[in-house]
Amino acid sequence: MEEAGLFKGSNSGLPELGTLAYANQEITFDVLKSTAMRTCMECHTTGRNAMGTPAEALALSGKILSEISSNAMPPKSSGYKTLTDCEKQIVETWLEDQAKSRKSVKIKDLPKCQGAVAPPKEEKPDISKLEVTFANLQKYIIAPKCLSCHAHDVEDVETVLDSVQGMHDAGVLAETAEESKIYQIVLPTAKRQMPPLKSGLPRLTVDEQVFLKTWIDKGAKEDTL
């Protein structure tokens, strides 16, 4: 397993920690973030559901366990795959280790990770070459740059951006991009450009701004099957 299996390194799509493969590592928070929770880190490093530090993750432990066990998170609607049984056990083990002040085990010693193989790393595509769909907008722009604060399940959220209907309800979509608040606010000329600098999230690139503008100008539609 160390040679070709779980969390091997560049060949398996996941980086190594120091000189050892993740399979040989004890389940520290850094290892957790880089393996089972790497998808979570795309959206939840800041905001009300932040889990970018051990304390933040522990404070949300009940919610994390509930949502990964029910496969509610990561959200399929945003193009993410559900966690594998191995990944779920990594999260469960780290949380239980912290709660019981217990010494962590190595990933390769977890029963559900025996013989598991890490999925290949999914390289972020060139956004300018992608089909202009809501699914692509959500997966590559909205989810990583907006949903830590603007998802329907965020406490006291006012502007929901995880669905087209939510955007309409929030009044951020108009007939054209130039008239739409969701587009206006991501431009460098905006008085309060989003995402805010304090969030630590990167601003939309020019290609991402163009993608958003094109989607709105084409009617801002849900994808059809």
Image: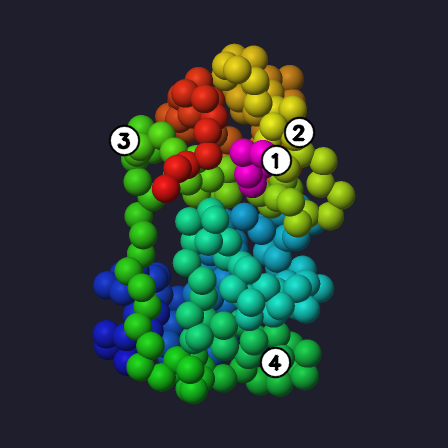
Q: Residues within 10 Å of mark 3 (few under 14, many from 20)?
A: few
Mark 2 or 3: in front is: 2
Quickly name the residue at label 4.
Answer: 97
Mark closest to the chain's N terminus, 1 or 3 = 3
Pointers 2 and 3 in contact (C-beta within 8 Å):
no
Pointers 4 and 2 in contact (C-beta within 8 Å):
no
Pointers 1 and 2 in contact (C-beta within 8 Å):
yes
In front: 162, or 107?
A: 162
Q: Quick one: SS at disc 4?
A: helix
Mark closest to the chain's N terminus, 2 or 3 = 3
**Spatial distance from mark 4 to mark 3, Cα to Cα?**
44 Å
**Spatial distance from mark 1 to mark 2, Cα to Cα?**
6 Å
**Spatial distance from mark 4 to mark 2, Cα to Cα?**
41 Å
Of the residues shown, which amino acid type is indicated by label 2? Ala
Magenta stretch contains residue 164: yes
Quickly name the residue at label 1.
Answer: 166
Q: Which residues are magenta?
A: 161-166
Quickly name the residue at label 2.
Answer: 170
Mark 1 or 3: in front is: 1
Number of numbered callouts drawn: 4
